[in-house]
Amino acid sequence: MVDIIKKKRDGYTLTKEEIDFFINGYVQGEIPDYQVAALLMAIYFQGMDDEETHLLTDAMLHSGEVLDLSAIKGFKVDKHSTGGVGDKTSLVLTPMVASVGVPVAKMSGRGLGHTGGTIDKLESFTGFSTAITNEQFIKNVNSVGIAIMGQTKDLAPADKLLYALRDVTGTVGNMSLIASSIMSKKLAAGADGIVLDVKCGSGAFMKKEKNAFELARKMVNIGKQAGVKTIAVISDMDQPLGRNVGNAMEVEEAIDTLRGQGPEDLKELCLTLGSYMVTFAGKAGSSEEARQMLTDAISSGKALDKFAEFVKAQGGNSDEVYHPEKLPHAENRMTIKAESDGYISSIMSEDVGIASLLLGGGRTSKDDVIDLSVGIHLDKKVGDECKKGDVIATVYGNDQDRIESAVERLYSAYSFKMTPVKPEELIKGIVD
Ligand code: URA
């Protein structure tokens, strides 16, 4: 292991044997954390070429169980986002595409730090559970068209160990490490096609467009080398997606979008990602045709009904899909007002995520219990004009001290300008 660390430290390329040695040794507990931490730091600074990244992914993918989804009829498409704030696309997308006949077999995670997780959000529905067996998972995809389960401990265990170590050693933000982490899990989860949403901007791992495109290219290459159809959409995360941040509040916004009334950016991103999922699955001849099918599924109510059916199949109260006022709601609120006339020039997504965490809506360690009812509504977004005294954001919480800390953090997330501001393009490009 010392030789491998020194080799990478000095900028050389690791071989398959060396990569397999360190992944297998780490998973089996034979290589200590401090040596793997040193290697991760060497990788962080020296990088890995495409072949090394592919070999690392392959070693991680085969460090545990690889799901066999062949019992599911049809072409299964998975979707993954590199992580953002207010990102509730999976809640909208999965029922939308399932309602036009694309089977969705999805593994999702919980939130950690300032980012949320799909599983926590779904647990806003009374009784909903993602703790289902592989057999139930496959059965639900065949009968309902969607199933979402938590990542089992047997799936890509090397990623679990490495991610926890990266989190505490300042080595998360390396492209090869991110690409192999995401793709090893996605490939182990057995989909036939993968649509990636690579976030770019202040609230994302990749702050610069150039790096987001490079990460997308690496992930698409890994997918293709594994024989899985893969495409990446690069989307803006310079401000949160949609207007709500917080678990139950994001579910409400997803329901609004499935009813055709959600925010424009969320709807647009879901239609873009969804149209690739539908064309991958061969249900439409072009992304334009797929887009039309998805738009029709929203206006006919088919997508919302599919969401209710899915929530019910996993033990949740589907009545709450049609009556989101029954979802958990916080008791108190506090508004933030503009102190002068102007235009919103930026909203730092990370600070908004941290404000939600301060309210109790997120975790600082993986065993924390979260308050699903709390969150933030962004009344104004980038480019919006505001007059002195206009409400720019509303904080919903259950504890006054927490609300005040969140308000302070949220206020610092906003920047203003005196002259009109043009928001960033939502979709920055496609890598296929
Ligand atoms: N999400 C992951 O699953 N892994 C990373 O490394 C970064 C984001």
Image: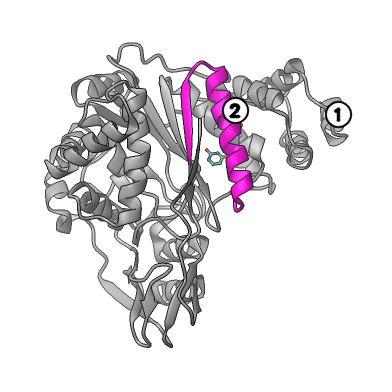
Q: Is mark 1 within 8 Å of ligand 1?
A: no
Q: Give the range drawn in magenta.
A: 206-233
Tag of residue 280:
none
| Residue 26 sits in quarter | top right
**Is residue 95 among the parts visible in the rendering?**
no
Q: Give coordinates of residue 310: x percent, y percent.
A: 21, 34
Callout 2 secondary element: helix
Question: Of residues 208 and 420, which is closer to you in this image?
Answer: 420
Confirm whether residue 142 shows in the render: yes
Residue density around tag 2, few if under 14, some if 14–19, many if 20 or more, within 10 Å: many
Q: Is 335 located above or below residue 152 in the figure? A: below
Residue positioned most to the top: 70
Q: Which mark is residue 158?
A: 2
- Determine the CA span between mark 1 and mark 2: 21 Å
Residue 386 image offset from top left, x and y in percent: 37, 80
Q: Where is residue 47 in the image (x, y as percent from the top left)?
A: 74, 36
Residue 266, position as x, y percentages in the image: 34, 51
Q: What residue type is labelled 2?
A: Ala
Which quadrant of the figure shows ligand 1? Answer: top right
Q: Name the residue under label 1.
A: 7
244 relative to 405 in the view: left or right = left
- Determine crowd level at label 1: few under 14, some 14-19, many 20+ residues with C-alpha closer than 10 A: some
Between marks 1 and 2 in the image, the one whose residue lies nearer the viewer: 1
| Relative depth, front residue between 199 and 360 | 199
Residue drawn at 35 percent across, 87 percent down: 389
